[in-house]
Image (tube, rainbow, N blue to C red):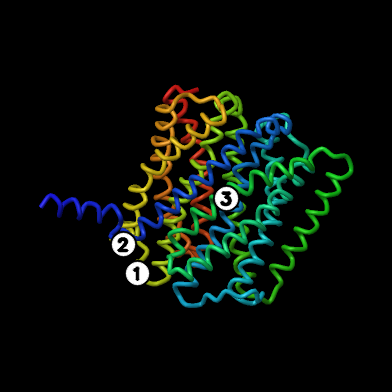
Amino acid sequence: MRRGRLRRGLTRLTGGDPAAFGAVFSALVLAGLASLAAGLILASSTGALERLPGLLMLVPAAIALRGNIFGAMGSRLGTAIHTGTFRLTPRLDSVVGQNAAACLSLSLMLGVALAGLAKAMAVVFNVSPTMSLADFVAVGTVGGLLASAAVLVITLALTSGAVRFGLDLDNVAVPLVSATADVVTLPALVVGAELAGVPVLTPALAWSLAGLAALAGLWAVRTRLEALRRVVKESVPVLTVAGLLDLGAGITMEKRLGTFLAFPVLLVLLPGYLGTAGALGGVLSSRLSTKLHLGLIRPGPVPAAPARGDIATTFALSVPVFAMLGLMAAAGAAVTGRASPGLADLVGVAVIGGLMATMVAVAVAYYGTLAAVRFGLDPDTHGVPMVMSSLDFVGVFTLILTVVWLGVA
C-alpha cells in the first residue's frame, strides 16, 4: 500500500508523464551547466562593467531577447511538428525558412530599439554615468547579431534532433535555447564592447545599423510571405514590452552593482538563475500552447486537470534544479577564486528566491497563454517572450530580495 501511495504521489508530481518530466529535468540540468559557463564569463567581465557604465543594463535584455525570439521559434516549430506541418528545408517560403528570416529581422530591429530604450531609461531613472547612445547601439546590436546567428543554428539543430529521435520539442526547446542564448550572448557582448568609444567608427556603425534595422522592418511587414509577416507583426509589440521589463531588471542590477562586485559568485549564479526561472515558465507556456492548439484543454480561470499536471511538474522541478544551480555556482566560484558568502547561504538564496520566481512563472505562463488565446493571438509567439521577460524582472527582484533577507550582502 505504501508503495502504491508513493507511486501515485510520484505520478502526480510528474504530471502523469515521467518521461516528459525526465526530459525537462535533463534539459534544465544541461541548461544549468551551460549557464554556469555564462556566469563565469560575466563574473570575469567586471572590468568591462566598470569601464562601460550601463553595460550591465543591457545584459538581461540582450540575453532575454535571444531567448525570447528563438524560444518562441522553438515553440512554434514544436507546434508545427505536432500538427504535421513541419518540414526541414532551407526554402524561404517554408515554415522553417519564414521563421528563421523573421527571427533574424527581429534580432536586428529589436537590437537597435532596445539600445535606444536603454539610453532613454538610463536618463529617466538617473543611472549616471552611462555610455553614449552610439555605444549602446554598437555594443547591443553587433553583439546581438553575432549571438543570434549562433542561436539560430542551435535551434534548428535541436529541432532536427527532436524530429529524428522522437523527442517532444516543447519539453526541451525553451531551456536549451535560453541556455544557448546565455552562453553565446555574453561573449558576443564583450566582443561588441570593443567597438564602444571609437571616434568616427562607433557613430558611423550605429547609424548604419539603425538604417539596416529600418529596411529590415519595412521588408518584413511588406513581404508576401504570410507567416513571416504575421510573426514579425505579432512579435514586435510583445518583444518591446518584454524588453522594457528586461531593461527594468538591468537598471535594478546596475544600481546594485556594488553587491555583485563584492560577491562575484552572484554574477556566476545570475544567468542560470534567471534562465531557469524563465525556462520553467517557458516550458509550461509551450506545453499549454500545444494543448490549446490540439484542443486538449479549454481556456478557463481555473486550470483543468491536464494543466494542473503541468503546473505540478513545474514546481516539482524547481527545488532540485535551483539547489543544483547554487551548488554549481559555489563550485565554480571556488575553482576560479571568486568571493562567496558561503555554500549554505548561496544555496538558500537560489532555492528560496527560485521558489518565489516559480510561483510568478506559473501564474504568468498560464494566464498569459490564456490571454493570448482570448485575444486571437498565437500563444506560441506571445507566451514564451512574456513569461521569460517577466521572470527576468521578477528573478532579479527575488534574487536581490533574498540576498538582503538572508543578510548575505
Of pointers 3 and 2, the one earlier in the residue sequence: 3
Marks 3 and 2 sit apart, C-alpha to C-alpha, by: 28 Å
Q: Position of residue 95 (x, y in %)?
A: 58, 73
Q: Which residue is mark 3?
A: 242
Of pointers 2 and 1, the one earlier in the residue sequence: 1
SS state under label 1: loop
Query: Do residues under tags 2 and 1 come within 8 Å of each other at their CB atoms?
Result: yes
Q: Residue at x 43, y 50 (%)?
A: 280
In this rendering, the answer to whether 328 lies above or below 345 is: below
Q: Is residue 157 left or right of residue 351?
A: right
Q: Which residue is mark 2?
A: 306
Query: Do residues under tags 3 and 2 come within 8 Å of each other at their CB atoms?
Result: no
Of pointers 1 and 3, the one earlier in the residue sequence: 3
Marks 1 and 3 sit apart, C-alpha to C-alpha, by: 28 Å
Q: Position of residue 26 (x, y in %)?
A: 42, 53
The amino acid type of the residue labelled 3 equals Ala
Q: Which mark is residue 199?
A: none
Q: Which residue is mark 1?
A: 296
